Amino acid sequence: MTDYMNSKWALELVDLQREDGSWGYFHTLSNPSKRYPITTEQALRRLEVLGYTIDDHPIRKAVSYMHDCLTGRDALPDRREKSHDWDVFSELMLATWIRRFTKEDCDANCVAEKWADIISHSFEEGTYDHDKYVGTYRNVFQSPPKGDRLADLATFYQVSLVADLMRDDIALALIEYLLQNPTGIYYLYDQRLMQPPQEFQSKQASRYLAAIELLAEYKNPGCCHRLAFVATWLRQNRELEGYWDMGPGAKDGVRFPLSDSWRTKELRVKDCTYRITRILRSIEGSGGAKHKGGVGRRI
């Protein structure tokens, strides 16, 4: 088992964490500054990639901070974005990141249940119905969805937030919709997921795999099987020696590198092979076990 938790990348991030558990601004699209060189969301994503969990002190501090912001005991330092309903969007972001590390936060779970109802109603006829999405959203939040990050459910936040809450048939319909969506999943990959990138050794391919990693979190029967074409594509791009190399261009400072440096090809290959092996295990190793959904089961 490769341990990246003690890499220089992880230690640098932990050293930058503030006393309140944040890293300054929260949202990925907020503008870092000399005072806040990285956002809390960027730090959490990077630490998650490097193997940090709720069992680790920096994550527990961050989750406590996010819980306080979600419940109004604290407030995000980001400016309120006017392009969408900031209160709904900030609640969505915070609940998503809390639940990526723990499912035992009742307030985050309440937010997840709202979105599970919205998404379940949107797919209750077997395919996505945007009018039902808008109508259910309006009923839940007492206003129509505003802005591209709320008017479209195909974003990292919504897809991540409800991964363990969908009834089996709803989950499969959602996965199919996301695979066929011409603009992919907002924040992760902006093209149709059914068509893997032509260039495997690229940053684009790494971003594509980030979207696939998210979809593989849906363990309902049939969902991971629907990703079998990705496993085929990955094996087609395996080197003759049995490893994977996504090339130096895949380095993005988030998902790569994992090792302290990519000065040698061996370290790059180790990182790429580690990540892809985990993806294959996630897609092919779920065993199709019966998934016990949450709120979505009421539909």
Image (cartoon, rainbow, N blue to C red):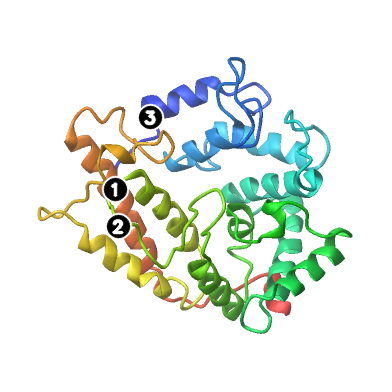
Q: Earlier in the sequence, mark 2 or mark 3?
A: 3
Residue 131 or residue 137, whichever sits in front: 131
What residue is at 34 percent from the left and 55 percent from the top?
278
Disc 2 crowd, CA 10 A, few/some/many (<14, 14-19, 20+)? few
In the displayed structure image, the side of residue 8 where residue 41 appears, left or right: right
Q: Earlier in the sequence, mark 2 or mark 1?
A: 2
In space, the residues marked 1 and 3 are separated at their CA atoms by 16 Å
Residue 270: x, y in percent? 23, 42
* Label 3 residue SS: loop
What residue is at 70 percent from the left and 38 percent from the top?
66
Mark 3 sits on what residue?
Answer: 6
Residue 243: x, y in percent? 18, 51
Q: Amino acid at mark 2?
A: Gln
Considering every residue shown, the one lying at the far right of the view is: 142
Q: Earlier in the sequence, mark 1 or mark 3?
A: 3
Q: Nearer the viewer, mark 2 or mark 1?
A: 2
Residue 36: x, y in percent? 61, 20
* Label 1 residue SS: helix
Residue 198: mark in rendering: 2
Please, is residue 229 above or below residue 169 in the view?
above
In space, the residues marked 2 and 1 are separated at their CA atoms by 22 Å
Residue 126: x, y in percent? 62, 83
Q: Nearer the viewer, mark 2 or mark 3?
A: 2
Please, is residue 138 above or below residue 157 in the view?
below
